[in-house]
Image (spheres, rainbow, N blue to C red):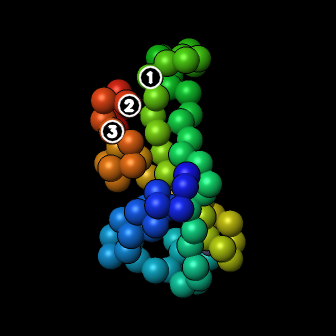
């Protein structure tokens, strides 16, 4: 994620999520992870290696390292046509 994307992601979070971390309850600074990640999708009990992308933006608490995941498609960080699941 470049600086412009990082700022866009942080701007998206402002006003949408409360400042306190749901894990440690501290209103410490949050930062986005350096990369958008996409875990493997599941089909029944099978992992679909190379399956449809599920792009996620990670928001990490600078106090307790709790990471929360948000849909990169819904955030507008990834075009819906680039991901099949939003
Ligand atoms: Zn925390």
The residue singled out by tag 3 in the image is 79
Vertical arrangement, residue 74 with respect to residue 8, above or below: above
Vertical arrangement, residue 14 with respect to residue 77, above or below: below
Q: Quadrant of residue 24?
A: bottom right
Q: Distance from label 1 to label 3 (Cα)? A: 14 Å
Q: Can residue 74 be seen in this snapshot?
A: yes
Disc marking residue 83: 2
Q: Residue 12: x, y in percent?
A: 36, 65
67 sits left or right of 52 in the view: right
The residue singled out by tag 1 in the image is 52
CB within 8 Å, label 3 to label 2: yes
Q: Residue 32: x, y in percent?
A: 55, 62
80 sits left or right of 47 in the view: left
The mark tally for this picture is 3
SS under mark 3: loop
Q: Residue 49: x, y in percent?
A: 58, 17
Q: Can residue 71 be seen in this snapshot?
A: no
CB within 8 Å, label 1 to label 2: yes
Of mark 1 and mark 2, the one earlier in the sequence is 1
Q: Residues within 10 Å of mark 1 (few under 14, many from 20)?
A: some
Q: Quadrant of the C terminus?
A: top left
Q: Residues within 10 Å of mark 3 (few under 14, many from 20)?
A: few
| Mark 1 or 3: the one toward you | 3
């Amino acid at each position: 994620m470049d600086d412009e994307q990082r700022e866009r992601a942080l701007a998206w979070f402002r006003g949408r999520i409360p400042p306190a971390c749901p894990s440690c309850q501290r209103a410490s600074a949050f930062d986005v992870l350096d990369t958008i990640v996409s875990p493997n999708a599941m089909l029944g009990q099978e992992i679909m290696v190379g399956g449809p992308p599920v792009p996620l933006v990670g928001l990490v608490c600078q106090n307790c390292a709790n990471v929360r995941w948000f849909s990169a498609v819904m955030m507008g960080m990834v075009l819906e046509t680039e991901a099949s699941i939003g």
